[in-house]
Image (tube, grey):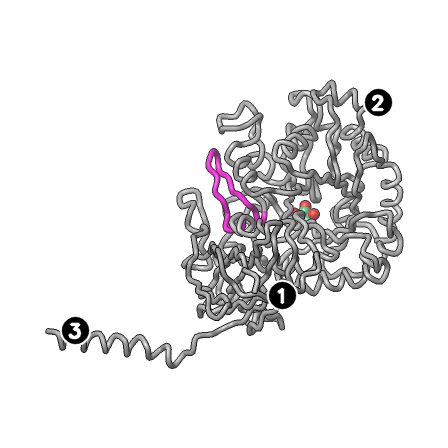
Amino acid sequence: MMNKTIKILTLSLALFALPLAVMAQRTVKVSVHEDAASGQVIPKEIYGHFSEHLGTCIYGGLWVGPDSDIPNINGYRTDVFNALKDLKVPVLRWPGGCFADEYHWRDGIGPAESRPTMINANWGGTVEDNSFGTHEFLNFCEMLGIEPYISGNVGSGTPEEMAQWVQYMTAADGPLAELRAKNGREEPWKVKYLGIGNESWGCGGNMRPEFYSDLYRQFGTYTRNYSGNRLYKVASGASDYDYNWTKVLMENIGNRMHGLSLHYYTVLNWGRKGSATQFTDQDYLATLGKAVEVDTVITRHKAIMDQYDPNKRIDLLLDEWGTWYDEEPGTVRGHLYQQNTMRDAIVAALSFNIFHRHTDRLKMANIAQIANVLQSMVLTRGDKMVLTPTYHVFKLYNVHQDAEFLPTDCDSDLLDAGSGRKVERVSATASRDADGVIHVSLVNTGLEEDVIVSLDFDKNVSGMIEGQILTSSDIRDFNDFDKPDVVRPEVFKDFKIAKGDLEVRLPIKSILSLAIRPAAK
Ligand code: AHR
């Protein structure tokens, strides 16, 4: 009996050892240079958001109105409100997008029942009842401690209209302050970010950069600072690879703008964007390849900005980014409602790892969009809400908000993403927070092998280490209303300290967040 047990055990060990001997475990070294940190901070605004009057982002997503049966706080849905509170949203852009250049703010103030309706011509021709307007947006931001980012209408508006909106929101005295008080808000709000138009090369007016630059200068002149409020003005920037747009604006607007925007979506083919949930492994890699190309795009826009502004007084703001797929079958055309899988989570994590490296100039990034549109944080249906895999990435990465950027090196091999694009198998980023805790975020983009990541720090690792991992059995997995927790973070303990370094077993298609308190040598 004893002999038989030993035989079985020996056989099982031999079978287990064989593949290991044939396939050596892949190891990637990540060096975290905490001693080389330069004090560069990862602005919390890199974790910014965008909410447009588009589909059910506002109506049904953030807002159901105070009379709704869906539980709400003054009209804001309670479940979404609480989810966003947990997320520590630093900044929220509103009311568009393309919608902004057809929005007239006076339609969205005063008693809700007397507000005029309009057709949302950009997004499905839906009738907009304006029940969510300036007060509803700014109060929402105030309640959640969010910095509002107002996107003003240049395309179909006038300098006077934009100037008066600023006055209505921020002036303590005068006729527009009185109107605001009559509408229920005595105190002016604080509004920092003001976008002067959106995509002015396209839905925002189909302008040439020279013409837009002049309009920026005109609108910028009359949007003033009132009652101690300091505006930070953002020029409507380029899309993707339009480097000429950036060049002309830098030349013609220069220091009149505080920030210059940029938009970048991971679309490979605008005619056939593909399904959010049904895709091949090759499609997955292709999306990642396109997502990480943002690195080159940011680098090139930055290089142009450097020529005109070597002291980096003008910020680059990626105020729209994310995945964009075909709308879910059966949903309203033009409402851009898409599911969100583990693929989206990986895209978000890789993007943050890149954004962190550009924070010498890149000071804000707003994912599109916060609810029910494109790569959203939450999806809602009736009184139900799910947190998407992307939401969980934002939450795992929150620790980097306003933390000091730590340079990292990673000797990962590259995966072929098609069309000449490559993706790192392992991607890493690190920061140190105000309490001295080092946060390392790692991504294994591969679908075939777990990787041993050897983390090498300038100082030996000891003390408290905590890990949280986001992964799933299939890259196509998503959270749905009847299965809301398919993709969710779990506690991670598969690490050990070896000779002062930290060794981690990083599973395929996973995102890992580690908190480490290194002891001095
Ligand atoms: O986020 C959806 C749309 O994408 C925005 O309205 C527009 O600015 C961009 O083209």
Q: Which residue, given by chain and number where applicable, does mark 1 sit on?
A: 33
Name the residue: 77% across, 60% down. 302
Considering only order in the chain, which callout, 1 or 3, is on the residue closer to the N terminus?
3
Instruction: Say which element carries label 3.
Output: helix
- The image quadrant of residue 166 is top right
Name the residue: 73% across, 30% down. 189
Quadrant containing the N terminus is bottom left
Instruction: Say which element carries label 1.
Output: loop
Q: Is residue 312 left or right of residue 499?
A: right
Report the residue that reaches farthest toward the bottom: 22
Kind of residue at badge 3: Thr
In this rendering, the answer to whether 24 lies above or below 372 is below
Q: Which residue, given by chain and number where applicable, does mark 3 sit on?
A: 5
- Confirm whether residue 286 shows in the render: no
Q: Which mark's residue is nearer the viewer, 3 or 2?
A: 3
Q: CA distance from mark 3 to mark 1?
A: 50 Å
Q: Is residue 107 left or right of residue 508?
A: right
Q: Is residue 150 magenta?
A: no
In this rendering, the answer to whether 425 lies above or below 322 is below
Other-residue count near label 2 (Cα within 10 Å), few / some / many at <14 / 14–19 / ≥20 = few
Q: Is residue 75 left or right of residue 234?
A: left
Considering only order in the chain, which callout, 2 or 3, is on the residue closer to the N terminus?
3
Residue 205: give x, y in percent of width and height. 79, 46
The segment highlighted magenta reads 374-390
